[in-house]
Amino acid sequence: MTHEQIPGTGVPAALRSVGVALNPAAPVDILLRLLADGPDEAREVLCRDRVLPGAVVDAVVAHPDARTRAFFAQNPYADPEQRARLVDDPEYRVRGHLAREPRADDVCLPRPLPDRTVVRIVETYENDHLGELNRLVSPGLQRAMTTHPSAKVRSMGIGRLSWKSLTPDVRDALLADPDPEVRSSADASRHLHERLLDPDAVREDLPAHHCHARTHLLLHGALAPDVVAEALPQDAWLIAGNDSTPPETVALLAAHPDPAVRTRVAQRPGLGQAERRALAVDADPGVRLTLSVHPALTEAERAAIDYEVDQDGWYGHCPVYDPESLPGPEHVRALALSAHPLLRRRAARQPHLPAGLVALLADDSDLGVRVLLGQNHPDAPAALLLRCFLEYTGRDRWHLTGHGNFPRSGLARFAGDEDPAVRRLALLDPGMSGDAADGLTRDPDPQVRADAARHPRLPQDRIAALLDDPELARWAAANPALPVATMYGLTAAVPGEATGDNR
């Protein structure tokens, strides 16, 4: 449960403690008091939902309550080095939370643990904790896993990287590894890879019933002609994406009655010219759109296709887990200069896009291009970020406000906007007048009211009044303008009292 979801319970004193726990201006001794004997919910949000001073981090890591330490293990605001201090925690649940990607919110994205901490997890944690490590592993460690000094890391690297992706020298070293578990894992990976390349082995291994193994083999295995013929009626979509499907079958699939199959064919990298011509005039608009971004087409050929790009969609942050997988400068430039909006959207996702192309795409005619640029480029200009927020109403819209270049000054002019999210935007303006903030504490939208209750320009008498409001007490207590003396009084009121069990 996030702090936004803690229900009003009619116990204002405890709710105020929750707010003080979130207050960025709360002194360290108050935070330590809440950590030691505050209500459960206050301790939860304190440890999980905010940046903590070093002294409080020290106290959290040493806290005798495992639930409290587990809350901190989930904290996306904490520096990964701080979370890493829990790596040898004696409690199973704490280690489990640390080995998962921390929970994120509208503006705070999780960051990977230090490499040494991930190695320690791999070497010492229970196997059921290791399945969720994916996003905690840095690209550098992932690439180095199969040659790492630790045998457990080498063994895990074999499972994370395909045998095909390893160089011959690395393969040979793994097969002759001094550790028997590494040798066994390497031999199993090699065996599976070789069987995947052998049409007879694929035929032998192919389950007759629909399952994950059948799907994997029909998508990636070397398929003999009889296997293709047998799969054609029911599994056309799968073999349409298989590199080993023969050209004559691909030609048949390009005319398949199911547009999903034809769309799959349109994605094949080695698609022949005849199939490209047929799919370019396909009756289904989705097939034509898919074909229109095929890498073999020229810009003129793309322009000749009757396609339509939908403006509605998700345009969010696209994290880069491996910088070495990013396209090269010339490829990115070609994408950015394309007349096709979907290709320009691919360019807009690239965090290394040079300044000249950033300026070009910031004024792009396509909403998706503009928003993806704003969501993903570290140097996205302020004017673009604000424009994106005002024009894009889809998922992860609020993430734009977490960008370092997002403007704050002047946003108060949106206080009367009909869109609640835009009115909420107005409350990011540090210069908003107290009267305007006061007015928004009475807004019809509950999130706007909550944000207004935390605005530092809110008049003191209104903050005091809201401390007795069952809905807004916690948010008023989180207001950084709240006098420190009041914070002391609020946190002394209900030591140890809980507002309800939400675990």
Image (spheres, helix red, strand yellow):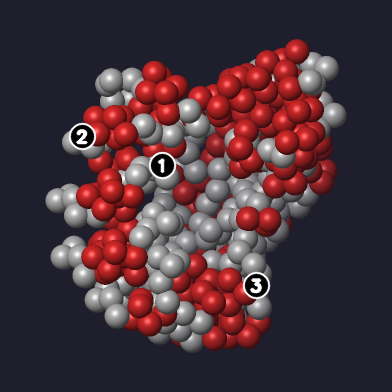
Cα distance, mark 2 to mark 3?
Answer: 42 Å
Q: Residue at x 63, y 85 (%)?
A: 356
Q: Quadrant of residue 491?
A: top right
Choose mark 3 or mark 1, whichever is in front.
Answer: 1
Mark 2 vs 3: CB contact within 8 A:
no
For marks 1 and 2, the one nearer the N-term is 2
Label 2 crowd (10 A; few <14 / some 14-19 / many >=20) = few
Mark 3 vs 1: CB contact within 8 A:
no
Q: Which residue is mark 3?
A: 329
For marks 2 and 3, the one nearer the N-term is 2
Q: Quadrant of residue 238?
A: top left
x and y, in percent, of residue 294 in the image: 40, 65
Q: Is residue 266 above or below residue 248?
A: below
- Mark 3 belongs to which amino acid? Pro
Q: Is residue 46 above or below residue 121?
A: below
Q: Which residue is mark 1?
A: 244
Choose mark 1 or mark 2, whichever is in front.
Answer: 1
Q: Which residue is mark 2?
A: 234
Residue 87, numbered label: none
Closest to the observer, 9 or 302: 302
